[in-house]
Image: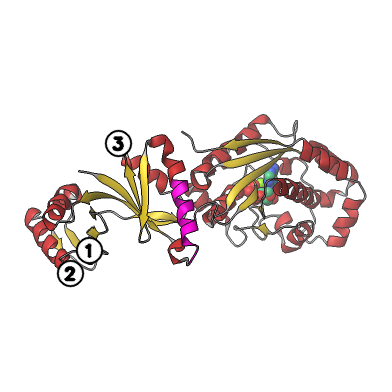
Amino acid sequence: MKEIVLVKYGEMALKGLNKKTFEDMLTKNIKRRLKSLGSFVCTSAQSTLYIDPQSDDIDLADVVDRVGKIFGIAALCRACVCEKDFADISEKAAEYCGDILSTSKTFKVTAKRSDKAFPMKSPQICAELGGILLERFPNLSVDVNDPEVTVTVEIRDTNAYVHAENIKGAGGLPVGSSGKAMLLLSGGIDSPVAGYMMAKRGVHIAAIHYVSPPYTSDRAQLKVEQLCQKLTDWCGGIAFYCVPFTELQEAIKDHCPEEFFTIIMRRLMMEIAQRIAAKDNCLALITGESVGQVASQTMSAIACTDAVCRIPVFRPCVGMDKTEIIEIARKIDTFETSTLPYEDCCTVFTPRHPKVRPVLSDVEKAQNSFDFEPLIQRAVEGTTMKTFNYEA
Ligand code: ATP
Ligand code: MG
C-alpha cells in the first residue's frame, strides 16, 4: 500500500492574494527539513500539501515527527493512497486502518469530496464504508459524537486518501514569512521559549549571546550553543553571534554606580544587538523578559532599556508566569539544557541592591560618565558567528 503524508495549512489558509508566497515558503521549509531522510515530491492543492516519499525505505514516523515541528501547519496525518474507486477505497480502508479498528470499540467514517465528479456523495460514502467496516470488525459500533477512531476518506483531484489519525501541527506561520529578528539568547529558560514563540509567528531567528571570559566559562557558551541547536528543530537554521562582553562589564563595574550595573549592562547589550541586527537584516530584537520577574524587568527598568532601542523589541514571554514558560520549555526540549548550572554574564556582576524603579535620566547620567563607544565598537568587531542547522 502506498502511503503519503497529508499536511493541512494553519492560519495561512486564510491569506488572500499572497497565500502562494506562504505556501512556497512552507514547501521550502518542509523540503529542507526532510532532505536528509530521502527524496520527496511535495505538491499542494486546496490548502493541503501532499508529501510523497519517493522510496519505500523512508520511515514515515520520522517524517511526521519532523513535519510536526514545522510552523504553518494546523494538522497532519499519514494516509493511504487509493484509486478513485469505492471498491479500492473500502478494501484499503479495512486493511490500512485494520490495527486500530480491531482494537477499538467505537468509530465513525467521515468523507470529504472535493472532486464533485466522484459518483458517490459524502453521506453515501460514509454509510456504505461504515457498513463494510462494521461487518469486518464485529468489535466495533458506530458513535458519531465521540468515536475512538475516525476513518476519513478524502476524494481529491487524482486520488482518494484514507486515514484514521489526525495529528495536531505546530500552528503559526511558515518561518521566514515574517522576516528576520535577533534573539538575545542567554543560557536561561526564558529566551529559548521567546525564540520559539516568535518563530511560530513566521519570524526567522538569528541569535546573539554575550560572554565574559574568564568570568564565564567555555561550558556556559557551549550550553547556549546546545540550546541553539535544539531550537533549529522549530526555527530552522540559526546564525549564532557570540559577543565578547568582558571589557564592557569591567568598565561598567569600574565607572558606574553599583545600583545601575544591570540596567546599563542591558542597555549596552541592546545597543550591540541592534548594530549586529542591522548587519544581518534583522528588523527587531527578541528577549525572554517577563514583567516583574526580576529587578531589571520592572516596567521602569524595561523603559530604561528600551530607550536605547531604535528597532522594535519583542518580548513574547512578557505576560507569562514562570510555570507557563517552563511548560513550553519542556515541550520544545530546552528545559533540561537551560537548567544546567553554568554561570551567565548577567550573574557575574549582579549588584546587591539593584534599582527596582530606575529613572531614565539618572541611568543616562550614570552611563554618560564614561565613554563606552570605543568598547562597544571593539565588542562588535570581536563578535564571531557560526550557523546551526537541523541535525542530519
Ligand atoms: P533567561 O531565562 O532567558 O535567561 P532571565 O529570566 O534569566 O531570562 P535575565 O537574565 O534578566 O532574565 O535576562 C533577560 C533577557 O536578556 C533574557 O531573556 C535574554 O533575552 C537576555 N539575556 C540575558 N543574558 C544574556 C546573555 N548572556 N546573552 C544574550 N542575551 C542575554
Ligand atoms: Mg538569564
Amino acid carrying mark 1 in the image: Ala
Determine the residue positioned at 60% across, 54% down: 179
Which disc is residue 55 wearing?
A: 3
Q: Is residue 28 shown left or right of residue 91?
A: right
Q: Is mark 2 within 8 Å of ligand 1?
A: no
Residue of label 2: 123
- Is there any visible trace of residue 352 in the rendered image? no
Q: Is residue 181 or residue 217 the one in the foreground?
A: 181
Mark toward the start of the polypeptide (3 vs 1)? 3
Amino acid carrying mark 2 in the image: Pro
Number of marks present in the image shown: 3
Binning the other alpha carbons within 10 Å of mark 2 as few (below 14), some (14 to 19) or many (20 upward) gives few
Query: CA separation, marks 2 and 1?
Result: 7 Å
Quarter that holds the N terminus: top left
Query: CA separation, marks 3 and 2?
Result: 35 Å
Q: Is residue 256 or residue 199 the one in the foreground?
A: 199
The x, y position of residue 367, in whole percent, is: 87, 51
Q: Residue furthest right?
A: 369
Determine the residue positioned at 87% across, 45% down: 373
Binning the other alpha carbons within 10 Å of mark 3 as few (below 14), some (14 to 19) or many (20 upward) gives few
Determine the residue positioned at 62% across, 60% down: 318
Disc 1 is placed on an element classified as: strand
Amino acid carrying mark 3 in the image: Ser
Residue of label 1: 111
Magenta-drawn segment: 17-30
Determine the residue positioned at 50% across, 47% down: 234
- Is there any visible trace of residue 243 in the rendered image? yes
Does the CB distance between marks 2 and 1 fall below 8 Å?
yes
